[in-house]
Image (tube, rainbow, N blue to C red):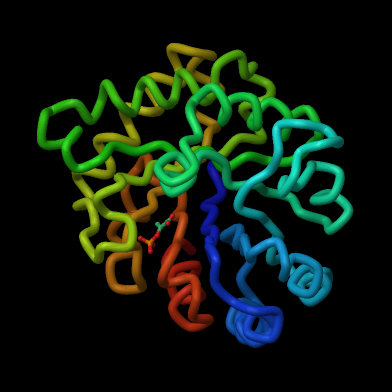
Amino acid sequence: MRKPIIAGNWKMNKTIEDALTLIEGLKLELADCMDVEAVVCPPFTALKVVGDEIADTQIKLGCQNMSSEDDGAYTGEISHTMLKELFVKYVILGHSERREYYKETDFWVNKKVKKALEKNLRPIVCVGEKLEDREAGNTESVVEAQVRGSLADITAEQFKDVVVAYEPVWAIGTGKTATSEQAQAVHKFIRGVIADMVGQDAADGLRIQYGGSMKPDNAKELLSQPDIDGGLIGGAALDARSFAAIVKAGM
Ligand code: PEP
C-alpha cells in the first residue's frame, strides 16, 4: 500500500563533477528499479546537472532546504520557484543538522512545510531525539512535540504529499543504528500521533522513513518492519553501489 521511498541526502558534499560521477553510477545501478521510489538530494549547486541526468529515469530530484518566503530580500536563501524551475520534487526540511547548527525551530520548519505543500513540493520532514532525550526516557515526548509542531495545521489531504523521516540524532553519522525494534516502536508511535492529528486514514497512508547510519547490511531488516516505509540516507548515499544496495533492499 505504501510505496517505499529511499532518499539520499548528499549534504555539503560533491562538486558538480563529483555529483555527475555519482549520478551516472546510480543510473546504471537503478535502471530497472521500479518498486521503490529513489530520491537524490544533491547540494543546490549540483541540482541542475543531476536533474538533467535523471530527467528520463525513475529517480526523483530532491533538495536539502528551502526558504519559507516567496522571493525578495532574503540573502542566501533559495525559493520554491527556483527549485521548481530545476524540477525538484522533494525538499528535506527540519534536518537535525539544520535544527542544531542553524537553530531551526518547529515554528520555522512548519512555515517551510506549509509553503512547500502550497507550491506542490513534497516535504520530507525530519524529527528525532538526541541521546540525552533517549537516556532520560523522553524519546516519545520529544518526537511528539516535533511532529505536532512541524506539521501543525496540515490537513489530511495535504498529508498525502508529506514524508516523515524519523532520525534519532545519536544514530546520524555515528555508525550507531537504532535496532529495528527501537525504530519500529517510534515509527508506530509517530503514526499514532498523526492519526490523532488528522485521522487514521491519513496516518495509514503516510510514509515514514528511518534515518541514522542505514547501510546495505542493516537496511533489509529495518525496512522489513511494518511501520518503516523507507530510509533517509546520509553517508551511504555518497557511493552509488551502497545507495543502490539500500534501494534494492526496499524492494
Ligand atoms: C542523515 O543525515 O539524514 C543521515 C541519516 O546520515 P547517516 O546515514 O550518515 O547517518
The number of callouts visible is 0
Is residue 200 placed above or below 10 in the rendered structure? above
Image quadrant in which you'd find residue 140: top left
Q: Nearer the viewer, residue 132 or 181?
A: 132
Q: Is residue 171 left or right of residue 156?
A: left
- Residue for point 56% across, 49% down: 3
Residue found at x 43% / y 49%: 97
| Place of residue 6 in the rendered image (x, y in percent of width and height, measured from the top left) | 52, 58
Quadrant containing the N terminus in the rendered view: top right
123 w.r.t. 242: above or below: above
**Image position of 239 with respect to 108: above or below:** below
Looking at the rendering, the quadrant in which ligand 1 lies is bottom left
Drawn side of residue 237 relative to residue 210, left or right: right
Q: Quadrant of residue 67?
A: top right
Q: As drawn, is 25 to the left or to the right of 195?
A: right
How far from the left and from the top, in percent, is residue 29?
Answer: 58, 83
Residue that appears at 16% across and 37% down: 132
Residue sitting nearer the eye, 159 or 3: 159
Q: Estimate the x, y position of residue 103 in percent, counting from the top left.
A: 46, 36
Which residue appears at 28% of the width and 41% of the height?
184
Residue 152 point in image, percent of width and height = 55, 16
Q: Quadrant of the rendered structure where residue 226 is? A: top left
